[in-house]
Image (cartoon, rainbow, N blue to C red):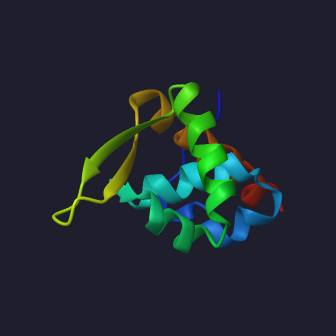
Amino acid sequence: MVEKVESGDYMSESDIEEFLSTPMKLLLIIAENDNIVQSQLVLVSKMSSSTVQKWVTWLESKGLIEVIETKTIVGSKKKIIRLTEKGKKVVDEIRNLSNMVLLTS
């Protein structure tokens, strides 16, 4: 079990970005931006739309995120993404592991 430390001691997303996989990066962004719209996720992540779509589909299939499709006032589709409880636990573990790296560096 990873020893818990104060939340202010966690590495920032930019600090840990170098060694995180694409789905881990997306999970952290979603965690920081609850109910993010998929188009915003593309902008924030600086990934292509097709890359984000691929990994959003994968994360949803693993039960880590929930995708809610709604329509805008003008009738276009909008996908809202949020973490599931399982996804929140995974994000906590990513942050704990990142903290371990910080403490050992």
At horizontal 72% and vertical 62% (from top left) the residue drawn is 16
Can you give x and y, in whole percent of width and height, for residue 104 in the image?
Answer: 81, 55
Can you give x and y, in whole percent of width and height, for residue 75 in the image?
Answer: 23, 59
- In which quadrant will I find the N terminus? top right
**Quick one: 69 or 16, which is closer to the camera?**
69
Count of numbered marks: 0
Question: Horizontal placement of 86 versus 19: left or right?
Answer: left
- In which quadrant will I find the C terminus? bottom right
Can you give x and y, in whole percent of width and height, for residue 62 in the image?
Answer: 58, 25
61 in relation to 23, above or below: above
Q: Residue furthest front?
A: 75
Question: Horizontal placement of 11 versus 65: left or right?
Answer: right
**Quick one: 9 or 54, which is closer to the camera?**
54
At horizontal 60% and vertical 68% (from top left) the residue drawn is 45
Can you give x and y, in whole percent of width and height, for residue 55 in the image?
Answer: 64, 45
Q: Residue furthest left?
A: 73
- Residue 58 in view: yes
Quarter of the figure with residue 28: bottom right
At horizontal 77% and vertical 50% (from top left) the residue drawn is 21
